[in-house]
Image: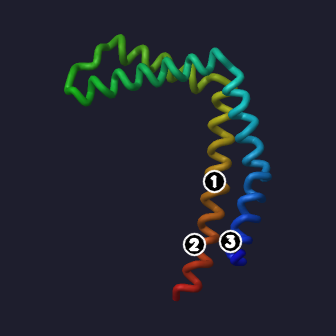
Amino acid sequence: MDSSLEIAGRLGEALSQSDQAQALRDAKDAVEDNAQLIQLMTDYQEQMDKVTQQERMGEAIELDDKRRLKELHDKLVADPAFKKFNEAQMEYVDLMRRINEVLRDKLEETET
């Protein structure tokens, strides 16, 4: 196996074992185990789709639809499991961003 691919495989393994990846898996499991939160997420997505469709069609968005969307959004972002999932997701994405920066910096060194 090419040494670059071997190193990439080790990096992938290290990432999958990182604290950030484990926190994301745990948070995802907590969300998936919460039927009430799953329903809330479904309701929010359906309401968002409805409002988006109305906007796309140039239709006026009813005040009740706007209120319902805000209400669902507020409940969603207040849910502890959802908050934890979002935080874990942001931490994981930040780790990936930092890794990409390091890789990009190293690649730029070889291209100049």
Amino acid type, callout 1: Asp
Number of the label disc, if any, that sits on residue 10: none
* Mark pair 2, 3: CA separation: 16 Å
Query: Element at badge 2?
Result: helix
**Among the two numbered marks 1 and 2 on one chain, the one whose residue lies closer to the N terminus:** 1
Label 3: which residue? 5
In the image, residue 89 sits, relative to residue 103, either above or below, namely above
* Mark pair 1, 2: CA separation: 15 Å
* Other residues around mark 2 within 10 Å, as few (<14) / some (14–19) / many (≥20): few
Residue depicted at 48% across the width and 16% down the height = 71
Number of the label disc, if any, that sits on residue 104: 2
Label 1: which residue? 94
Q: In this view, does 63 lie to the left or right of 48?
A: left
> Residue 14 sits in which quadrant?
bottom right
Residue 99 in picture, x, y percent from top left = 65, 64
Residue depicted at 60% across the width and 21% down the height = 38
**Among the two numbered marks 2 and 3 on one chain, the one whose residue lies closer to the N terminus:** 3
Residue depicted at 72% across the width and 28% down the height = 30
Observer-nearest of 27 and 6: 6
In the image, residue 88 sits, relative to residue 9, either above or below, namely above
Amino acid type, callout 3: Leu
> Marks 2 and 3: CB-CB under 8 Å?
no
**Among the two numbered marks 3 and 1 on one chain, the one whose residue lies closer to the N terminus:** 3
Say which of marks 1 and 2 sits in front.
2
